[in-house]
């Protein structure tokens, strides 16, 4: 029997298994139930035709899941829910989620299992949307080929950020007159971090921070040419060309150079930006309510900085602390570099002399030239 129809069951099935079986039933009906003829028309086997009839009898033409009904070593549902909850809360990777599961719930789960749980639930896990902006030019910075302290990222963090801290934590900081700004510097190669604090965001404090980081590294044996990458914040010169020029002249005497990142591109300071979340999760959020004085804040901050550099295991470094990784690279530095103190910039910058008036130079250009002569 020739019908003039040329159909391929395989092609129909690649589009939709349900539509392919519906086509089998329609052609079978037009052939008065002739199984062999229907199979020849669709270039398939009689077994496929019988399967379509059986699926029709069951009331389900689509494919069913081939997953087993019972899995002997399947992760318990309550554990999977805990993993998903922690992932949404922290956005950690599998290795850190493993540690967090032990610390929070006392449950030990393989990081491979955690990875698979996250993959299965990726559609249900809520993530923050990242808005992309237009690109602009910037000198190329090769993170991955740099040696220790060849590239150092500099940034400023507003501590009382409503997206990070609760209302009660922010109120506590303001009530006890604790620092509002955290100045950070991170070595891209080793993730070694330095921190300072201030109550004001100013160009003066920015200059002080650059000089302090440079002097700390140089005085502890770092001889490499340091490239600082910064954003366009006014505390780092912003769009004021003569401040950037003078900053480069000043740091050039120490064998350093400054590169400004593109506007609205925080990923160009990715290592330091990511560390801000760690600061919130492992210092400010759990500890800030216990701090009521400047001296106590200093001690807590120094303990945290030592923990970050010498104790905390970093996944990006192969689960070892930054200082251990720094030694592993073979760089020769003074051992006391790991005891980096978190200085308070407001007091330091006020005692540096006449040039500390730089914070008003955006309005008084003449004064700027008098000071630099």
Image (tube, rainbow, N blue to C red):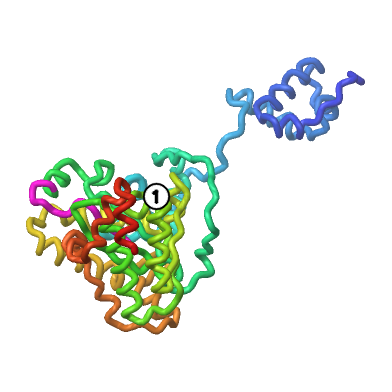
Please report the residue visible at 35 percent of the width from the left and 77 percent of the height from the top: 218
Q: Which residue, given by chain and number where applicable, does mark 1 sit on?
A: 240
Instruction: Compare residues 254 and 21 and report the one nearer the observer.
Output: 254
131 horizontally vs 357: left or right: right
Q: Is residue 271 magenta?
A: no
Q: Is residue 254 left or right of residue 370?
A: right
Q: Nearer the viewer, residue 183 or 316?
A: 183
Task: Pinpoint residue 87: horizontal percent, then vertical percent.
Answer: 36, 48
Residue drawn where x is 30% and y is 70% of the image: 309
Q: Was residue 180 drawn as part of the magenta stretch in this picture?
A: yes
Tell me if residue 262 can be seen. yes
Given residues 61 and 128, the one toward you in this image is 128
Tell me where the magenta segment starts and ends, as one range: 174-184
Q: Secondary structure at mark 1?
A: loop
Which residue extends farthest right?
2
Q: Compared to 87, does 226 lie above or below? A: below
Residue 15 relative to residue 237: left or right:
right
Q: Say which quadrant the N terminus sits in.
A: top right
At a point 8% along the width and 47% down the height, the residue shown is 175
Q: What residue is shown at x 10% (from left), y 57% (from top)?
A: 291
Position of residue 57 relative to residue 352, above or below, is: above
Corner quadrant of residue 337: bottom left
Q: Choose top left, top right, bottom left or bottom right for residue 189.
A: bottom left
**In which quadrant is the C terminus drawn?**
bottom left
Quarter-of-image position of residue 18: top right
In the rendered image, residue 326, in percent from the top left (x then y), is placed at 39, 76
Measured from the top left, where is residue 232 in percent x and y?
40, 49
């Amino acid at each position: 029997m020739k019908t003039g129809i040329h159909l391929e069951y395989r092609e129909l099935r690649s589009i939709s298994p349900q539509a392919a079986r519906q086509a089998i039933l329609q052609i079978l009906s037009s052939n008065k139930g002739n199984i062999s003829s229907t199979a020849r028309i669709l270039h398939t086997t009689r077994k496929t035709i019988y399967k379509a009839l059986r699926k029709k009898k069951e009331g389900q033409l689509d494919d069913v899941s081939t997953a087993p009904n019972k899995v002997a070593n399947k992760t318990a549902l309550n554990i999977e829910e805990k993993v998903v909850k922690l992932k949404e809360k922290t956005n950690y990777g599998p290795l850190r989620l493993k540690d967090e599961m032990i610390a929070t719930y006392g449950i030990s789960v393989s990081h491979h299992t955690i990875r698979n749980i996250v993959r299965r639930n990726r559609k249900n896990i809520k993530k923050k949307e990242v808005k992309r902006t237009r690109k602009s030019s910037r000198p190329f910075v090769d993170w991955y080929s740099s040696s220790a302290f060849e590239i150092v990222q500099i940034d400023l963090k507003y501590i009382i950020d409503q997206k990070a801290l609760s209302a009660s934590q922010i109120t506590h900081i303001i009530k006890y007159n604790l620092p509002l700004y955290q100045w950070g510097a991170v070595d891209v190669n080793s993730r070694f971090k330095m921190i300072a604090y201030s109550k004001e965001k100013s160009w003066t404090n920015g200059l002080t921070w650059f000089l302090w980081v440079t002097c700390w590294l140089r005085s502890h044996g770092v001889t490499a040419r340091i490239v600082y990458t910064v954003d366009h914040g006014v505390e780092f010169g912003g769009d004021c060309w003569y401040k950037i020029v003078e900053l480069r002249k000043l740091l050039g005497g120490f064998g350093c150079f400054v590169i400004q990142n593109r506007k609205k591109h925080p990923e160009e300071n990715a290592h330091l930006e990511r560390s801000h979340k760690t600061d919130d999760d492992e210092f400010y959020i759990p500890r800030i309510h216990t701090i009521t004085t400047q001296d106590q804040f200093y001690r807590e901050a120094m303990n945290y900085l030592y923990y970050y550099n010498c104790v905390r295991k970093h996944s990006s470094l192969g689960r070892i602390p930054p200082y251990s990784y720094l030694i592993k690279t073979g760089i020769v530095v003074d051992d006391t570099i790991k005891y980096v103190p978190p200085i308070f910039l407001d007091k330091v910058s006020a005692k540096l002399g006449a040039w500390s008036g730089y914070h008003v130079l955006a309005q008084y250009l003449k004064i700027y030239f008098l000071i630099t002569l």
